Amino acid sequence: MDGYSPSNMAALADVGVSHPLRRKLNSLGFHDENELRRLVDNVKLRGSSPRGKDIVGAGNTRGQLTVLLAGVACLYETLKSGERQNYTFYYPGDFCDLHRYVWSEPAAETAVRALTNCSIGIVECRYLDEAIERNRKLGLTLWRATMLEASILRERLANMSQRPALQRVSHLLCEQLHRRRAIGIDSGIIPLTQIDLADAAGLSAVHTNRVLQDLRTLGVISASGRKIEVANWARLAEIANFDDRYLTMPATLSKWEVRTE
Amino acid sequence: MDGYSPSNMAALADVGVSHPLRRKLNSLGFHDENELRRLVDNVKLRGSSPRGKDIVGAGNTRGQLTVLLAGVACLYETLKSGERQNYTFYYPGDFCDLHRYVWSEPAAETAVRALTNCSIGIVECRYLDEAIERNRKLGLTLWRATMLEASILRERLANMSQRPALQRVSHLLCEQLHRRRAIGIDSGIIPLTQIDLADAAGLSAVHTNRVLQDLRTLGVISASGRKIEVANWARLAEIANFDDRYLTMPATLSKWEVRTE
DNA sequence: CGTGCTGTTGAGGACGATCAATGACGGTGG
DNA sequence: CCACCGTCATTGATCGTCCTCAACAGCACG
């Protein structure tokens, strides 16, 4: 199970753990307490989605932005050949449809789907318009969120097109581990099916399975049949040739953060 | 040769053809004449780069943004295995290092390289800071530019990981054709070497060559040995299963454009 | 207690990588 | 004007990775 199941969201708030969105914006260098509070207050709970269900489909949620509050989701597309391609994974705090806010309708075949049971929040675009209007740093921060998405896509591109399957899968796992740790989930459990991984890695499910078995043989992931649990992070990163710089804000804060009054 | 060689930039201005940056921002839905004029006036010519030379390397151009004025460039990375991965192609009007402006230093191995002879302009970050400060729509437009980059990356990801080589190369060619036409270059000539294509498609140069020969046999590209010229756009798009929606602003203008007073 | 979805295994075959060598072209300097 | 050199294009042969098809086992669900 995921650290953030829908059922414990209320508990989260009580215990005083940061709202996922607040944590996300913090990690992007946005620390305006006042604005954060207002923004978080404007996130309405839309409900929950079971695994496999589309969160953002074609044409719905006009005028609203979707925030993932708990669970794991992905932006995917069903290609004409019938295969599925997972483009981006979403974790709590991520906006699932920023592209719609800034750009346009994506192709009709593109959608966001829940990979585990998810809890969904919504924000009115109108509210966000106003917030960006009065606080330019918020706009820059969201721009930066998009830049992070692009950064992840570039990394994936390099690792999918050039590397053999073992490294592809390992790299994907590393990305998930890091992103989960960034939101406070330290366990090595990755709540994705082999099929989800295959769709993201551009491999067949069969071959993905074989790669995972190899990783088990190497002692990198534990041997339980149904769930994927990384046992040896260092070895995994080594195999994947993983360098987390593309995921994290540099220690030398960007000028925008420095410019914070 | 390219429609925009460095040598005819001056001529461009005389004939009254749009500045590349103006055209780019227009295509992203930004039409504030006043702001555009000021921005363009603040683009200083940095000089030109011959094919193969790095335009944006590690650590230079602190405090400045790079705009491609003429030619074709690409964001690439030399992987540890020695292969090269082309992430993004840049065409006149594109900022080459927006990622640095918003995010941070990329990995040291990432750089921007001229693929043809290029003409380079620069803008002081400070100026852009001010411009975004006073004109919120400009910031949103640049955000949108990043979103377009991400959109292209997603499309590439799908086509690189799932499709056979013929479609990969075809799709890449289609992308170039469309982007070139968007900046006013209608010829079917694509000024890239087979090696450039291979690095972008994640294929070996040898196999890329064979694919191009197949395309010649199919009558899709012309048979001249040294340059790649697309002879049959429709057929190419068909092979590539190309859908240009991911590249273009929708006809139904985004709310931002509508909101333009 | 079936019905799906997920995970697992085997065998055969296609696609693309790799290695190696040659040809063609453009630019440079004598 | 010619000789030279580096980059790019081309060809053939071999080999490895990964796909495809097919079947079955296990677990979770109603």
Image (tube, coloured by chain):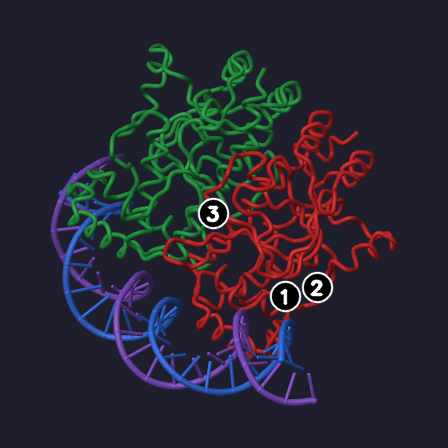
Chain colours: A green, B red, C blue, D purple
Element at label 2 = loop
Residue at 26 percent of width and 44 percent of height: A236
Q: Mark 3 = which residue?
A: A154
* Dots 3 and 2 on the same chain: no
Indicate the position of residue A246 as horizontal and vertical percent values.
44, 39
Q: Tell me, yes or no, if residue A196 can be seen here.
A: no
Left or right of B253 in this view: C24: left
- Pick whichever of labels 1 and 2 is earlier in the sequence: 2
Amino acid type, mark 2? Asp
* Dots 1 and 2 on the same chain: yes
Q: How dense is the environment of label 1, judged by Cα within 10 Å: few (below 14), some, or many (20 and up)?
A: some
Indicate the position of residue A221 as horizontal and vertical percent values.
20, 42
In the rendered view, tell whether residue B37 sits above or below residue B225.
above
Residue at 70 percent of width and 64 percent of height: B2
Q: Quadrant of residue A129?
A: top right
Q: Mark 2 = which residue?
A: B2
Element at label 1 = loop
Left or right of B238 in this view: A117: left
Q: Tell me, yes or no, if residue A127 can be seen here.
A: yes
* Closest to the observer, A40 or A144: A144
Q: Quadrant of residue B184?
A: bottom right
Using the numbered discs, state the Cα–Cα distance from disc 3 to disc 2 in whole angstroms. Answer: 27 Å
Q: Answer yes or no: do the residues labelled 1 and 3 have beta carbons within 8 Å?
A: no
Q: Mark 1 = which residue?
A: B191
Q: Answer yes or no: do the residues labelled 1 and 2 have beta carbons within 8 Å?
A: yes
**Pointer 3 indicates a residue of which chain?**
A
Amino acid type, mark 1? Pro
Q: How dense is the environment of label 3, judged by Cα within 10 Å: few (below 14), some, or many (20 and up)?
A: many
Element at label 3 = helix
**Pointer 2 indicates a residue of which chain?**
B
